[in-house]
Image (spheres, rainbow, N blue to C red):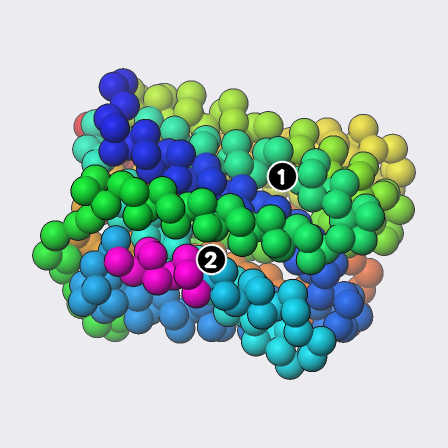
Amino acid sequence: MKITKNLKVLYFLGFVLAIAAAFPGYIRSTFMEEFVDVGRVGLFFLGEALLSLTAINFFPYFIKKISNYRLAIIIILLQIISIILLITTDSIIGAFIFFALTGSLGYLIWINMDVFVERFTTNPTTGRIRTTYFTFLNLGWLFSPLLAGYLTGEGNYRLVYILATILLSIALIIILYNKKLLADHLQYEHHNSLKTLKHIWNNINLRGIFAIAFLLELFYAIAVIYAPIYLHQTIGFEWKTIGAIFTFMLLPFIFLEIPAGIFADKYNGEKKVLYLGFMIITSAVALFFFVKSDNPFVWAIILFLSRCGAALIEAMRESYFFKTVDVKDIDYINFFRNASPLGYLVGSGLSLLILCYYSIDYLFLILALILLSGFYFSWRIAETKK
């Protein structure tokens, strides 16, 4: 597959943005423990999810009015400012507000990136282009935990956020430098949220792939918020060890997604790969409950397997959805990205409820049971067409 200059720019831009997100990604919940105890950390993510859902639903209007290119610049600038405010506040209320603002802006920039990439994608190569794009994103996530683990091992949570602002500034320069390539003049179709929701609900394929996306984001939410806390506080691993484990854990996103995308394009095989992905991820999450070992190699393997399943599901989620919609369907793309904050909303709310009565390992057992529904939704959607 020939990679155009536009896609090369977007792949590199996505890589830089992913590193910026990944640096603080796995220490956010632990950083919030400077303000509240572990049982209330979920409230920060709950607030972030509510703000994100609200912001995402208004986002198509601003893309249509301002343009995707200009809005991407504004979002990155606002995110840099919100991170600086987050790491300089001493107030619980201030931390709650800036934490939620930083997270919601992070969701919005990925919608900008979705629109950029979809402009240069055609259906016959959707699987390969989207999975190559996500491989670059995951490369950004791959190396960050190791450095973040080293820095946080020294107690430098705020330094991790400072590095994120530097990377966001680099991403901003890339966007400004490539204005001719990225500036858009499309007439985006825009419908109200109720009409969009009705269309998705009445389309069994869109409804099914949204449910699959939600299940994956629910897994990400609980894994990102509580896996580091569980490994650090319950199992007793140091942050340097956790950083090394997380780096190994992310390897499947690098090696599995592009082959899965090629397979999907060549054989219309999204459903087959989804079945395999859900089988692996459900089994791995269940092991969080049953395994009590303090051996870091055991946990590295369990986490690695969980991401094998997640990588396969993520690749097919992107391939299937973007074969179903077009770049002008900004409302559907926008609504699709609601799955992530919705996953955090449900995940953090469910976690707060479960942790009131049970220990943290039961949270993963219940998650595994919920993930079993992925087999039903994978069965319900139709095969894609070439």
Amino acid type, mark 1 = Ser
Q: What residue do we see at 87% from left, 33% from top?
A: 295
State which quadrant residue 43 falls in.
Answer: bottom right
The picture places residue 138, in percent across and down from the top left corner, at 51, 35
User: Does residue 76 sit above or below 23 in this rendering?
Assistant: below
In magenta stretch: residue 75: yes
Q: Quadrant of the C terminus?
A: top left
Element at label 2: helix
Screen quadrant of the N terminus = top left
**Magenta residues, dominant SS class:** helix
Q: Is residue 207 above or below residue 342?
A: above
- Left or right position of 321 against 214: left
Q: Does residue 242 sit above or below 254 in this rendering?
A: below
User: Quick one: 41 or 11, which is closer to the camera?
Assistant: 11
- The answer to which quarter of the image holds residue 161 is bottom right
The residue where tag 1 is placed is: 144
Magenta part of the chain = 70-78
What's under tag 2, amino acid-wise? Gly
Decide: few, some or many residues near mark 1? Use Cα within 10 Å; few <14, some 14-19, many ≥20.
Answer: many
Looking at the image, do the residues carrying marks 2 and 1 touch, with CB atoms under 8 Å apart?
no
Residue 209: where, in percent of width, then height?
36, 48
Q: Is residue 234 left or right of residue 79?
A: right
* Mark positioned earlier in the residue sequence (2 or 1): 2
- Label 2: which residue? 106
Q: Which mark is residue 163?
A: none
Q: Position of residue 126 (x, y in %)?
A: 27, 32
* 270 is within the stretch colored magenta: no
